[in-house]
Image (cartoon, helix red, strand yellow):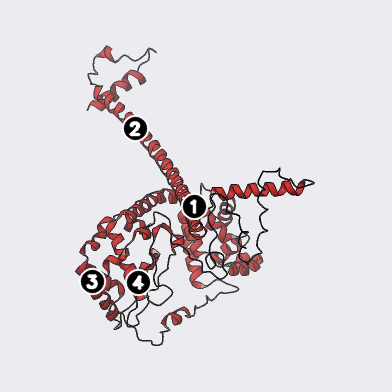
Amino acid sequence: PQYFKIIEECVSQIVLHRSGTDPDFSYRKRLDVDFTHLLEVCVDKARIDEYEQSTSELAQKFDEEFLSRQEAQAQLVKCEEKIAELQAELQAFRSQFGAVPVGLSSAHVGQTSSSSAFSSGPQPHVPAPGVPAPPPPPPPPPLPGCPAPPPPPGVPPPFGAPPPPPLGFGGALGSPTHHALPYGLRPKKEFKPETSMKRLNWSKIRPQEMSEGCFWVLADENQYVKPELLSRVALTFCSQRTAKKEEEDLEDKKSIKKRIKELKVLDPKIAQNLSIFLGSFRMPYQEIRRMIVEVDEEQLTEPMIQNLVKHLPEQEQLNALAKYKNEYANLSEPEQFGVVMSSVKRLRPRLSHILFRLQFEEQVNNLRPDILAVNAACDEVRKSRSFGRLLELVLLLGNYMNAGSRNAQSYGFDLSSLCKLKDTKSADQKTTLLHFLAQVCEEEFPDVIKFVEDLEHVDRASRG
């Protein structure tokens, strides 16, 4: 009722008022409506709109800053990996050749300068009587592959230089080169099971490929070594050397039926689907062609391009229909549309690019939550202690089962190798290594099963 009273009074004051003066609502004293509530509602609505706009702007800035932070962290990780590689190379060089002493380098520089002075001067320097003679010039460097000659008798080694190594150590030919393990890694235990077992085909990671903060540097699978567990593994996964099955090869050799393509007219099913598509868009075929060529985003829609890509005939059929351009009036509607669209070069790639352009903004907005989920999942995987213990247990079982093969004594494996646990079957073909691992964890290591609680975002990240 209050609104109707306001409308009535406004109409009577503005529309029916003929004196030309400004409306005066207080003169007639009929409008006794309290406008305070209406003004508060309008003010609150304006504030809400302002807050929503500022919130969207702050959210956009947050996403931009978060992405830039992720890029900076990725660059930092690359730099840290490069530094770790250089430190590993330096450590290996020091362990193999030893550190270069300062006294030796300075003595070598002094000898080089003195020898150059003797060669450039016209006559050698003759010492004064009572002054000891200078040491003789150093011997020439040895030939490649030959050991260094011993120093001349009576000449002590320069101050600070280490004594020459004995024969057979460092200077002798054929001496073995020992590659030191980086980051304090110790040689892995070599298992020698009594029976041959099926192999766990994992992707082995070499110690030189690891970084200092890598999980495999700190992993200790020896804490799970138990004779009962290893004998149980050997009994479950013992293998008898039989011929390999060729089921996978047969699946790879399945023949793919070729699509029957008409050279003159369209396939009846394709023509029917194209007719349904054209019936949903009542516009001339030339207009559709113009919209595609000019990329008219005001009229082109995502469902339209999707249906057109889905029901568009093959390029060979369009080329065949182009020959019937002079018989355009005698063709059916789908074939007429094919004749019109056959003149557009690279039609299917053009439609795919238009569809990507129309979906770009939506895909970017949908991708941001997936990026955040993947980053959170990676942090959970790195910080989960239960999942780390599971990886250590898998490393132990894999090294034991792969004993005697090229994948034995591994220091780590690629996480994608976890998917191959279900492919390693037992001797009776009734269970897999994955089921065996789950049973062992439930019976002997129940804390390992709790790793699922630590990985909350992994499921969301895997579906992204």
| Disc 4, SS | helix
- Look at mark 1 in the image and give the residue it sits on: 82
**C-alpha span from label 3 to label 2:** 55 Å
Q: Marks 3 and 1: CB-CB under 8 Å? A: no
Query: Which circle, 3 or 4, is nearer the viewer?
Result: 4
Looking at the image, tell me whether mark 3 or mark 1 is earlier in sequence order.
1
Give how far across and how far down residue 299 sits, in percent: 51, 49
**C-alpha span from label 3 to label 1:** 41 Å
Q: In which quadrant will I find the N terminus?
A: top left
Q: Residues within 10 Å of mark 3 (few under 14, many from 20)?
A: few
Give the residue drawn at x 39%, y 40%.
62
Q: Marks 4 and 2: CB-CB under 8 Å? A: no
Q: Do we see residue 344 in this rendering?
A: no
Q: Residues within 10 Å of mark 4 (few under 14, many from 20)?
A: many
215 horizontally vs 124: left or right: left
Query: Which circle, 4 or 2, is nearer the viewer?
Result: 4
- Look at mark 4 in the image and give the residue it sits on: 398
**C-alpha span from label 3 to label 4:** 16 Å
Give the vertical position of 74 relative to 397 (above or below): above
Q: Residue furthest bottom?
A: 242
184 horizontally vs 157: left or right: left
Give how far across and how far down residue 122 sits, in percent: 80, 46
Looking at the image, tell me whether mark 3 or mark 4 is earlier in sequence order.
4
**C-alpha span from label 4 to label 2:** 58 Å
- Look at mark 2 in the image and give the residue it sits on: 51
Kind of residue at badge 3: Gln
